[in-house]
Amino acid sequence: MPIYNKLVRDLIPQVIEKTGKSFDTTILSEEEYHSELRKKLQEETDEYINAEDDQSAVEELADMLELMNVLAEQHGSSMEEVEKVRKEKAEKRGSFYDKVFLISVED
């Protein structure tokens, strides 16, 4: 039996159950949950970086966005607040559309 030891989407147990396979799950404590959310975001980021086509990249971005929704709530916020902060930062410091690559700054 493969061992995964990772956070999965809420409906994955039902998906596995429909295949007739047996599985083990547990419910995480709040501390474990927050830690695993961070690990999962890193996993999805790595999968995005390694995506070989646009469709795969978009799928991974969707997973990252789902995790960001949950993480925003974990921090007592919301995606609306995250978007507000994003816009404020873009207004004050710009975005990343201009492809500016900083090489050095004189001390």
Image: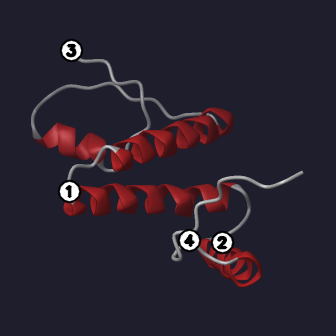
| In front of the other: 99 or 95 | 99
Q: Are marks 2 and 4 in contact (CB under 8 Å)?
A: no
Classify residue 78 as left or right of residue 16: right
Secondary structure at badge 2 equals: helix
What's the CA distance linking mark 3 and mark 2?
A: 40 Å
Mark 1 vs mark 2, foreground winner is 1
First in sequence: mark 1 vs mark 3: 3
Is tag 3's residue or tag 2's residue first in the polypeptide sequence? 3
Q: Are marks 4 and 3 in contact (CB under 8 Å)?
A: no
- Picture coordinates of residue 97, whole percent (x, y): 51, 76
- Residue 53: mark in rendering: 1
Residue furthest to the bottom = 91
Q: Which residue is mark 3?
A: 1
Residue 13 shown left or right of residue 30 in the figure? left
Q: Residue furthest right?
A: 107
Which amino acid type is shown beneath numbered disc 4?
Answer: Phe
Residue at 54%, 59% in the rendered image:
68
Nearer the viewer's eye, disc 2 or disc 4?
A: 4
Secondary structure beneath dot 1 equals: loop
Q: Do residues under tags 1 and 3 come within 8 Å of each other at their CB atoms?
A: no
Look at the numbered discs 1 and 2 and tell me whether their residues touch, using CB distance below 8 Å. no
- Which residue does the numbered mark 2 point to in the structure image? 82
Q: Secondary structure at mark 4?
A: loop
- Which residue is denoted by mark 4 in the rendering? 96
How many residues crowd mark 1 within 10 Å: few (<14), some (14–19), many (20+)?
few
Q: Report the Cα–Cα distance between label 4 and label 1.
A: 21 Å
Image: 72 above or below 82: above
Counting from the top left corner in percent of width and height, residue 70 is at 55, 58
